[in-house]
């Protein structure tokens, strides 16, 4: 049974999506870079803030906040659908499913959750044994933050002060 997705206008979400059959279809650096290009294009079409991300070989994580009135489902449908079309064309496929189940999303309710998700995403490549230090994973938000790259990912403090740094009183 498919449960309705929990959505809330103005919410921040931890989104994950897996490749069909857990295959390593995102393994190449070029494919990961191309996926990020689709995320950038989606930001222009459906405004949202991306605070963190991690692209692994068989799944992705996004920490995303759609702007008010924007639909998380439409954002993810656009990213995943258009990337799948590109991937199928690139690999000479006549269709089929690149992505497995529908994407998972969880609303981030407070700063503790936000920080736990940041840490989880940042350390995913280290836990998987791909890198020794989390900040060395080029396809994650931590690497981008450390290198001042804000073309896709935003600095959480500047982008989300009401969640990251609640005002006193």
Image (cartoon, rainbow, N blue to C red):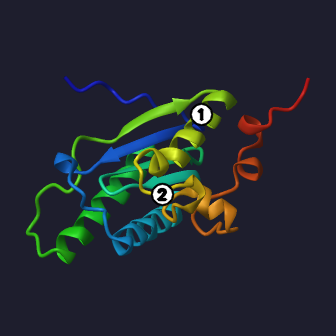
Distance (Cα) linking label 1 and label 2: 20 Å
Q: Position of residue 140 (x, y in %)?
A: 52, 58
| Image disc number at residue 83 | none
Name the residue beneath numbered marker 1: 116
Count residues near mark 1 (Cα–Cα under 10 Å), then give few for <14, some for 14-19, many for 20+: few
Q: Nearer the viewer, residue 59 or 1?
A: 59
Is 100 displayed left or right of 70 in the figure?
left
- The quarter in which the C terminus is drawn is top right
Q: Quadrant of residue 136?
A: bottom right
Is 100 displayed left or right of 103 in the figure?
left
Q: Is residue 94 above or below residue 54?
A: below
What residue lies at 33% left-to-right and 26% top-to-bottom? 4
Of helix, strand and loop, which one carries label 2? loop
Q: Position of residue 19 (x, y in %)?
A: 25, 51
Q: Nearer the viewer, residue 119 or 34?
A: 119
Q: Is residue 35 above or below residue 59?
A: below
- The quarter in which the N terminus is drawn is top left
Q: Please report whichever mark, 1 or 2, sits nearer to the chain's N-terminal start.
A: 1
Q: Residue furthest left?
A: 94
Q: Is residue 5 above or below residue 128?
A: above
Is 57 displayed left or right of 2 in the figure?
right
Name the residue beneath numbered marker 2: 131
What residue lies at 71% left-to-right and 51% top-to-bottom? 159
Q: Judge whether residue 17 can be spotted in this image.
A: yes
Q: Position of residue 38 (x, y in %)?
A: 41, 67
Of helix, strand and loop, which one carries label 1? helix
């Amino acid at each position: 049974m498919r449960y309705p997705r929990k959505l809330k206008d103005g919410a921040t979400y931890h989104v994950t999506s897996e490749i069909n059959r857990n295959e390593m279809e995102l393994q190449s650096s070029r494919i990961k870079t191309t996926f990020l290009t689709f995320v950038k294009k989606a930001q222009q079409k459906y405004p949202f803030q991306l605070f963190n991300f991690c692209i692994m070989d068989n799944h992705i994580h996004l920490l995303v906040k759609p702007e008010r009135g924007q639909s998380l489902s439409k954002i993810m449908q656009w990213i995943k659908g258009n990337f799948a079309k590109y991937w199928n064309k690139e690999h000479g496929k006549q269709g089929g499913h690149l992505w497995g189940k529908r994407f998972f999303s969880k609303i981030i309710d407070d700063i503790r959750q936000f920080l736990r998700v940041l840490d989880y995403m940042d350390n995913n490549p280290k836990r998987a044994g791909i890198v020794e230090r989390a900040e060395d994973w080029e396809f994650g938000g931590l690497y981008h933050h450390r290198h001042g790259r804000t073309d896709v990912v935003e600095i959480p403090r500047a982008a989300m002060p009401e969640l990251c740094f609640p005002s006193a009183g």
